[in-house]
Amino acid sequence: QVQLVESGGGLVQPGGSLRLSCAVSGIFFRYNNMAWYRQAPGNQRDLVALIYINGSRPLYADSVTGRFTISRDDGKSTVYLQMHTLKPEDTAVYYCNTHPPVSSGYWGQGTQVTVAS
């Protein structure tokens, strides 16, 4: 079955950077569009960035455009999210998943990103 293991989160000061990783197994990774989502306390889970098969046409939420970069390594079945110029409003639990999310409703444990001075 699908397994999604996110890592790389942490506490960072405003203006700092983090790189998130998500190791994926149980699906044909290279044939799936992949995405990063985030959920802040009290909010719904929102799409942050999307990368299509073969790495083409990344799409970003307006709030992160120009600051975040999504990438994928099909050989490692891993998707990344490089985050720069982090803001307090980026604080959330970050999840990866296919796009649309896997039909079973499965989500990994996520990785906490906290931006605070």
Image (tube, rainbow, N blue to C red):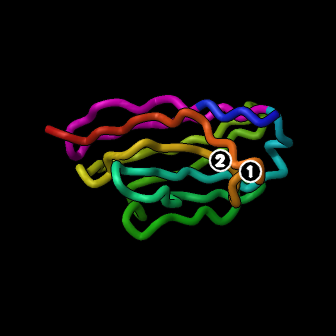
Residue 110 - label: none
Between label 2 and label 1, give the one nearer the viewer: 1
Amino acid bearing label 1: Val
- Label 1: how many residues lie within 10 Å, few (<14), some (14-19) or many (20+)? few
Identify the residue at horizontal 57%, vertical 41% (top origin): 80
52 with respect to 38 (left or right) = right
Q: In which image quadrant can residue 55 be found?
A: bottom right
Rendered location of residue 105, percent (x, y): 69, 49
Distance between mark 2 and mark 1 Cα atoms: 7 Å
Over which residues does the magenta segment extend? 6-25
Which sits in the foreground, 58 or 3?
A: 3
Identify the residue at horizontal 47%, vertical 43% (top origin): 94
Give the SS element for disc 2. strand
Q: Residue 109, relative to residue 81: is it above or below?
A: above
Amino acid bearing label 2: Asn
Which sits in the foreground, 86 or 47?
A: 47
101 with respect to 28 (left or right) = left
Identify the residue at horizontal 86%, vertical 42% (top origin): 28
Residue 102 - label: 1
Rendered location of residue 15, percent (x, y): 23, 46
Rendered location of residue 103, percent (x, y): 77, 53
Location of the N terminus (image quadrant): top right
Asked whether the beta carbons under mark 2 and mark 1 sit within 8 Å of each other, the answer is: yes
Give the SS element for disc 1. loop
User: Is the stretch drawn in magenta largely helix, strand or loop?
Assistant: strand
Location of the C terminus (image quadrant): top left
Q: Residue 2, relative to residue 87: is it above or below?
A: above
Residue 13 belongs to magenta span = yes
Identify the residue at horizontal 43%, vertical 51% (top origin): 39
Query: Circle 2 is placed at which residue position?
Result: 97
Rendered location of residue 24, percent (x, y): 71, 34
